[in-house]
Image: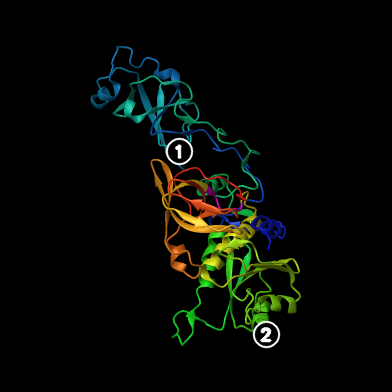
């Protein structure tokens, strides 16, 4: 059997280069940018006000507060503070510039975001003014440039505001919008063909007969595919015969990667590897020294990887998370395609046999002392509820382990968490 590390290395060797596509700005969230985004003009494009107030010449405010008022904001309410009186000659609002320049002894009412009119070199906050009969009293001195966002202070024309390889978050998309980009070139999302195998499977919603169970693996894996950034494609259900499975594989042939569940063990009806051979799939490995998930197969059909995952629901999902998920993330150009790892304090004891790497489902809780890993009970590979109750996979190497409450352990995070520092990269 291959080690987890070697199986992962072989898996990642099949990763393709990210394929580019242009998508609308609103559809680019979470995608990886494949180009630098460059400002075509200064940002902001013109000097604009950072406050509601008055656009003035700073020199005209220098006589304000000359008589020692200590609470100009309070005085402004009554108009009793001393300061120069200026003539209001216009109003500037966002989207509505004032065409009248500011001359000596004049001021323009200005709203936040409005272009600063010609002649003005400062903005006085409205709280520090008092208006009366077309005149306004300035009750605090202003320095040149005060409360003005200068043209190009964020970016000059030609400056890169987002870089290739960046994961596009809401704020980064906002910056791209601010420089006028309506579309972005990003890595295309791989289409993941999902095939469920087994004579016993029935689609949810239909009545069960003796010996049948509802098909759940493709549903669970479709959710994980979306979380990873791929596009799940339901390629249907195959019975336990080469002909049915071959037809399902052919339905999945247009996808970027094929993932089947079930039929990869050593039973008489486990026909996935036989079907791969019949279709000319080049089998790279079969069986990995891990628990759960030992019967895992990887092959290639042309340049397309084909994963044969175990049929037990936990085994299928754990092997997906360790191998298929990083393949999807790397294909998307993600700089770190692996699940993040945190260190936690164990609050239960357990014993593990030597021989295989083990992934133990745990519930992580953040406390003032850091992460604590709690047991979710039954670790059987046929219990999907145990993974639904988990938000982490505790990592135990292939050596024998006897763990006690209070021990420090490494845990893969299954979902985004708001506490603690996660270690990038794969831990093995």
The residue carrying pointer 1 sits among few (fewer than 14), some (14 to 19) or many (20 or more) residues within 10 Å by Cα, namely: many
User: In the image, which residues are magenta?
Assistant: 337-341
Note whether 291 is above or below 86 in the view shown.
Answer: below
Left or right? Give the position of 401 relative to 326: left
- The single residue placed furthest to the top in the displayed view is 67
Q: Could you say where residue 318 lies in the image, as x and y percent from the top left?
A: 55, 62
Residue 272 visible to an observer of this rendering: yes
For disc 1, the marked residue is 113
Residue 414 visible to an observer of this rendering: no
Note whether 279 is above or below 336 in the view shown.
Answer: below
Q: Could you say where residue 90 lies in the image, as x and y percent from the top left?
A: 40, 33
The residue carrying pointer 2 sits among few (fewer than 14), some (14 to 19) or many (20 or more) residues within 10 Å by Cα, namely: some
Residue contact at pointers 1 and 2, CB within 8 angstroms: no
Q: Which mark is residue 165?
A: none
Which of discs 1 and 2 lies nearer the camera? The answer is 2
Q: Which mark is residue 243?
A: 2
For mark 2, give the secondary structure. helix
Residue in front for this viewpoint, 157 or 272: 272
Residue in front for this viewpoint, 103 or 25: 25
- The single residue placed furthest to the bottom in the displayed view is 209
Q: Earlier in the sequence, mark 1 or mark 2?
A: 1
Tell me which corner region of the image, top left, top right, bottom left or bottom right, holds residue 131.
top left
Q: Could you say where residue 200 lies in the image, as x and y percent from the top left?
A: 53, 83
Tell me which corner region of the image, top left, top right, bottom left or bottom right, holds residue 124.
top left
Residue at the image point whose x is 52% and y is 66% from the top: 314
Q: Could you say where residue 382 lies in the image, as x and y percent from the top left?
A: 49, 70
State the quadrant of the N terminus.
bottom right
Report how far apart the C-alphas of labels 1 and 2 lie in the structure.
67 Å
For mark 1, give the secondary structure. loop
Residue in front for this viewpoint, 62 or 89: 62
Q: Is residue 338 magenta?
A: yes
Q: Is residue 359 magenta?
A: no
């Amino acid at each position: 059997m291959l080690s987890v590390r070697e199986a992962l290395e072989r898996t990642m060797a099949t990763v393709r280069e990210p394929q580019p596509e242009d998508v609308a700005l609103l559809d680019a969230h979470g995608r990886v940018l494949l180009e630098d985004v460059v400002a075509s003009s200064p940002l902001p494009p013109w000097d604009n006000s950072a406050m509601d107030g008055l656009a003035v010449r700073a020199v005209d405010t220098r006589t304000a507060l000359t008589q020692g008022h200590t609470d100009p904001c309070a005085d402004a309410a009554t108009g009793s503070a001393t300061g120069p009186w200026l003539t209001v000659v216009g109003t500037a609002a966002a989207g509505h510039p004032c065409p009248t320049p500011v001359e000596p002894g004049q001021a323009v009412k200005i709203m936040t975001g409005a272009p600063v009119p010609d002649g003005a070199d400062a903005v006085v906050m409205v709280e520090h003014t008092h208006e009366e009969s077309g005149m306004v009293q300035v009750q605090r001195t202003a320095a040149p440039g005060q409360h003005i966002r200068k043209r190009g202070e964020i970016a000059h024309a030609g400056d890169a505001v987002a870089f290739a390889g960046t994961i596009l978050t809401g704020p980064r998309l906002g910056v791209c919008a601010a420089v006028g980009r309506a579309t972005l070139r990003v890595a295309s999302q791989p289409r993941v063909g999902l095939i469920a195998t087994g004579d016993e499977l029935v689609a949810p919603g239909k009545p069960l007969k003796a010996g049948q169970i509802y098909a759940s693996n493709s549903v669970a894996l479709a959710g994980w595919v979306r979380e990873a950034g791929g596009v799940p494609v339901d390629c249907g259900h195959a019975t336990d015969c080469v002909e049915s499975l071959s037809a399902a594989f052919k339905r999945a042939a247009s996808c970027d990667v094929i993932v089947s569940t079930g039929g990869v063990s050593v039973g008489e009806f486990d026909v996935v590897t036989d079907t791969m051979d019949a279709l000319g799939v080049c089998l790279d490995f079969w069986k990995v020294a891990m628990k759960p998930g030992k019967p895992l197969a990887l092959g290639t059909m042309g340049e397309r990887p084909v994963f044969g995952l175990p049929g037990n629901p936990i085994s299928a999902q754990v092997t997906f998370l360790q191998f298929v998920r990083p393949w999807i993330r790397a294909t998307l150009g993600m700089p770190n395609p692996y699940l993040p790892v945190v260190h936690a304090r164990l609050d239960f004891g357990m014993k593990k046999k030597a021989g295989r790497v083990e992934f133990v489902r745990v519930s992580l809780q953040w406390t003032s002392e850091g992460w604590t890993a709690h047991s979710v009970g039954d670790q059987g590979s046929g219990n999907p509820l145990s993974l639904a109750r988990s938000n982490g996979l505790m990592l135990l190497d292939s050596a024998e382990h006897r763990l006690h409450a209070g021990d420090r352990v490494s845990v893969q995070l299954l979902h985004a968490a708001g506490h603690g520092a996660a270690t990038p990269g794969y831990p093995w």
